[in-house]
Image (cartoon, rainbow, N blue to C red):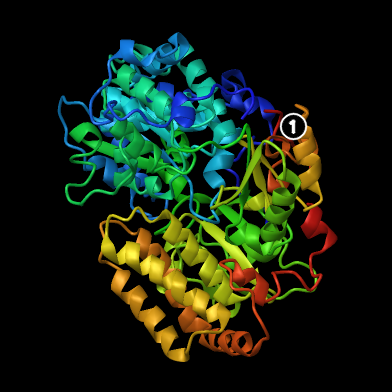
Amino acid sequence: MSGLPVDPAVVEGRVPERSSAEVPELHEVGCPQELREEIEERMSRYPDRRSASIPALWAVQRRYGWCTPEGIRQAAAVMRVTPAYLESVASFYDLLHTSPAGEHQVHVCTNISCWMRGADDLLEAFEAAAEGTEVFVSGFECLGACDIAPMASIDERYFGPLEPGDAATALEQLVAGQDVLPEKALAKRPLAGDRNGAGGGGDA
Amino acid sequence: MPETRVLLEHAEDPKLRTIDGYRGHGGYASLEKAYREMEPDEVLKELEDSGLRGRGGAGFAMGKKASFLPRGDMAKYLCCNADESEPGAFKDRELMQRNPHQLIEGIAIAARAAGAGHAFIFIRGEYDLQADILDAAVAEAYEAGYLGKDILGSHCDLELVVHRGAGAYICGEETALLDALEGKRGNPRLKPPFPAVQGLYGGPTLINNVETLSNVPHIVGKGAEWFRGFGTEQSPGTKVVSVSGRVKRPGNYEVELGIPTRELICDLAGGPLDGCELKAFYPGGSSSPVLKAEEGLDLPYSFEAMAEAGSMLGSGSIIVADHTVSIPHMALRTARFYHHESCGKCTPCREGTNWTVKMLERVVRGEATPMDLDIVASVQDNIIGNCLCVLGDSMAMPVGAMVRKFREEFEQTIIAASSAPAQPKESDMDSAVLPRPGAAGAISAEGATA
């Protein structure tokens, strides 16, 4: 977990007197200014501030790498809700992590269409390639890209169709900070019916 | 058979996603017409007359749904369901990525018809690229005065927020979507009251799918009569159909509703991979009962024909299986998905999906008896109609159909697996017992690289 701020709760464990059933005060939680402003801006977009719970948790996850207990307390203090409430939301959704999840994320779709086109082998290849790296690889339910099966979402961008041999290349590029598999990016793919024509989807 | 492109017209133009590119192709003319020249009731009537049916799965008439919202001065909401998460469906992703303004224009026009002052696009969290594209397009639309206060001097306001979900299939269910949008866990609500009466924040709410709303500018611009010129009497219009699985050219194809299904699978999508034979397909996403190739290929692709055949058009997503695909394993993959995504609120769904997965695992491990297949079938019967939402039904319908139509293959799978030597006892058994799809080296060069 190099590079990401470490939540004290990970090192010291949870502090028992901090009840997650009470709304924490802002001055107790040390919420960074930018995080507070982002959550407040999100809350202002909705008729009810609680609608910003998912956007707030996204903001926490972007800042700390996952929804850390202290990050959740900070968001709860800004939103004036209990940490328990935000924890209940975070634990419901697959993309919000309530435990450390690595600096890079690879989700390999293993659902019906991708499975039919070799997703199990692809997932194995990614798992093998990620050994000993800071990349978090997991199988995932349908990502909505059956047209490029088998596919993977790499740091929230879609790539496919992939072959097991692409896994090592993709992870090397990812860790080195290069463009990942540019020729296999969904963003650059033409419409299926235009594949032989001049059309292109344009760049992202 | 060529495509009939209405929603995907000009989609090959990368500038289409900018407001200038969209206006260059005539975009936002319908919005100007709806806000400058038409009363809300006239817009609503046009939508009702068009017969446009919801493209998200249920196929309910969109204009009728909008007409259920009470009249009068109160806070009303419009939610665009962009939580496309059903296995096999990827059309909304394409529509948002290539033509975000078409959707925004449709939302603004539908909001005028329904009298909604606040609109939300609930997009699944995985669609990060598409959400970024929508964010940029919404900002452009505000800048141009198509959203915000007093749109085009009509005294109508509309705020539009792009709301990213965080990975839960259940949020595509309309009442779960409302809970998620209110900032809670996405659990479905008891209906009635229906969202049209009591939805988001307790106010009347219209919920429509991306593709449904993307049709709206075309209907208002060219008229309900023009729209009815496409498709069939009961399924007017065009449909963006996602075709995937074991075909040569998987992708989104826009066609008139009612064309033979064979043309979609065998012509547009290129047919089966070389050396493979079509076996079965889901006609409307993973929740639709599978059809055998011989019973389904010659059916017209329409809401009514699919319903008559005992299946459904659903979201309009075809997943094709060929002879290399083991149906019991496909049933297990399907069941696992719904088991993973069940929110756990209703017992028949929570327990039924769990036990179906366990029983199907026993089938592929060879530990089941033919009687277990009857139990699998009876579990499905006990789920259908007994939950707050249709997530459990969505597993029960395809799995039930697979057991019924391919019972012999299930029995052979049990026998083959039980007589096979030492098997690894692991949850991913299913891929170890039988050859993986296409393992016979059947993937053609085109299929593998296209």
Q: Is residue B142 visible?
A: yes
Residue shown at 42% from the left, 42% from the top? A93
Q: Quadrant of residue B414?
A: bottom right
Q: Is residue A56 visible?
A: no
In this view of the protein, which residue sits in the foreground, B307 or A157?
Answer: A157
Q: Position of residue A71 (x, y in %)?
A: 42, 24
In the image, is residue A170 above or below residue B238? above
Residue shown at 46% from the left, 83% from the top? B404
Mark 1: amino acid: Val
**Disc 1 is attached to a residue of which chain?**
A
Residue corresponding to mark 1: A175
In this view of the protein, which residue sits in the foreground, B436 or B297?
Answer: B436
Q: Position of residue B123 (x, y in %)?
A: 46, 36
Q: Is residue A197 left or right of residue B346?
A: right
Q: Secondary structure at mark 1?
A: helix
Q: Position of residue B231 (x, y in %)?
A: 49, 55
Q: Is residue B291 left or right of residue B432?
A: left
